[in-house]
Amino acid sequence: MTQTQISASGARSGTPVPGRGSAAPMPLRTRLQLALAGLWLLDGLLQLQPYMFTKNFAVQTILPVTDGNPGWIATPVTWSAKIIENHAVATDTAFALIQVLLGLGIAYRPTRRHAIYCSAVWAAFVWYFGEGLGGLFTGQANPLTGAPGSASVYLLAAILLWPTRRTGPFPAAAWIGARAARIVWSAFWTGLAALTLLPTNRAAGAFTDALTGGMMSTGEPSWFTTMTDHANRLIIGHDLTVAIVLAVLLGLIAVSVWLPRRELVQAGLIAAAVVGAVYWVFGQAFGMPFMGMATDPNTGPLMVLLAAAYWPVRGHDAVDAAEAAKGAAA
Amino acid sequence: MNAPSFLPAILSTLMILLAGYGAWRLAIARAWGRTTDVETDALHLAVGVAAAGLLASWAHTLPTGVWAALFAAAGLYFAARAAMVRSDRDLRSGPLGRAVVCAVLVYCFLAGVGPSTLNGSTAGQYTMAGMPGMIVDKTISFPALGLLTVAGLAFYAVAELSRLSPETEPGSTSGSATAGAMETGGAPARLRVAASAGDFLAPRSVQVCRVALLVVLAYAILSKVV
């Protein structure tokens, strides 16, 4: 075997592996940052779909966001849609490039801090100018179909996974502290519970519309439409009941992070991840990628990511207890 | 369906450059007395040429069936290699990653991913499918599998890129692993193996090439979906 041929395959012939078995598992917080990077990269790639380079992206995807929104939201969204419509190729190239660079930047450790900062700024920009604040002011925002908007959850994820030297009882607590992180969690899930109980979301046929309405079933594979049809048959005529049960579940998830026992906290986080997964499959149709018009995978995967960010880290019980005691003393 | 022509042209050129770099490494390493990973460089050479043809007509080389058979054979070879060292995670990851790349290429060729002369997109007009005069796109072969592959490639690319830089964040206890990685510029374990056996030729550039390759393959598949 020549020198040139010595390689990974060289190890085959018995080359000793230096440091073999010494690699420790990657911290959960870093894994979550990489998951966020993967989602940003995926968003950037989705932005490169042929449809995104056409005027239809502005007309069919951005402009409908203005429906029902007050003027202070609708006007800027219309303004941005007009720019995109008139310069479809240039704007979409820029959007895709930004998101691909965000994904790669977060993945590469030396640029991670700056990339996460930029991702927060970009997510806030997209949430306002592209998603119209997720329809929160339309009175029709439904968490099942993606409210409060995936960009807002990207923003939240960037804040909770902000690179820092500090540690915490769970990954999301590292930068803003455990108490603040729990407040954020409770506010987020309570908000989802409140949106679920909006009149439009508990009205007769609301869940059926969310599951099979709009363009969701068009272009979807048959296995998926069959699955949603079955789910639809189960809940048809029980919209109010389903809304109340779901809101109670979301409320329990909201308070779960404050519970004293680790097992209960973990149960709440698992429930949150399951709700995120169910929303993603049945309400968001995986972000509707089958038609070539998806800009992101929607909020489902991000909800699972958030739940993972609150997973208790072993060895931080003492820190947690000390913080709780400090809070009680205050 | 097709994106603006400049994008496939740029990415095809990038893939050809990547293939050329793989060929250059294979040719120059012996002359310079440097170590390199023959399998990786050869694979980058083949994938670079094949991927360029997936994106632009002018870069088309071998027939689809030949490419599919070639990568299927290579994928089986790498899968067998990975199976032989399945108990060793460090040694397994290299051939396994190469087998995955080969599988993606086989999928691309079987699913008909390739350059198109059509401009624009019929996406959205799907909503009118079945109505007289409306366009129904028939180009999708395996969209669910394709989209799953795209997502997998995105996360694979991120994982590969993260290995370029040692993780030194708080909470990380990988001190020895980090130190080892820094010695070879953050190269993964399998490259460190080679580096320890000799002077490895630019290991970080190999990983950069792999990341570029994964991202471009994901784009090639997505550009096929409506």
Image (spheres, rainbow, N blue to C red):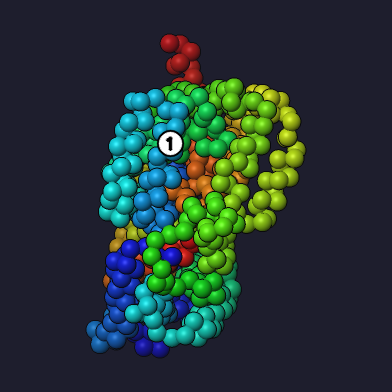
* Percent coordinates x, y for residue A306 in the rendering: 50, 37
Mark yes or no: residue B70 visible: no
- Tell me the quarter of the image containing the N terminus of chain B: bottom left
* Percent coordinates x, y for residue B63 in the rendering: 47, 85
**Farthest residue in the left direction?**
B32
Against A182, is B89 above or below?
Answer: below
Against A20, is B24 above or below?
Answer: below
Against A316, is B92 above or below?
Answer: below
User: Looking at this view, is B62 or A4 the one in front?
Assistant: B62
Residue that badge 1 annotates: A65
Specify whether B84 is left or right of A148.
right
Chain hosting mark 1: A
Q: Quadrant of residue B119?
A: bottom left
Tell me what residue is drawn at x 60 percent, y 27 percent.
A201
Q: Residues within 10 Å of mark 1 (few under 14, many from 20)?
A: many
Query: Number of callouts in the render?
Result: 1
Q: Name the residue type under label 1.
A: Val
Specify whether B81 is left or right of A127.
right
* Percent coordinates x, y for residue A204 in the rendering: 68, 28
User: Looking at this view, is B11 or B157 the one in front?
Assistant: B11
User: Looking at this view, is B17 or A238 the one in front?
Assistant: A238
Tell me what residue is drawn at x 60 percent, y 41 percent.
A213
Tell me what residue is drawn at x 39 percent, y 61 percent.
B120
Q: Quadrant of residue A273?
A: top right
Q: Give SS at disc 1.
A: helix
Q: Quadrant of residue B14?
A: bottom left
Mark yes or no: residue B121 visible: yes
* Percent coordinates x, y for residue A244 in the rendering: 67, 23
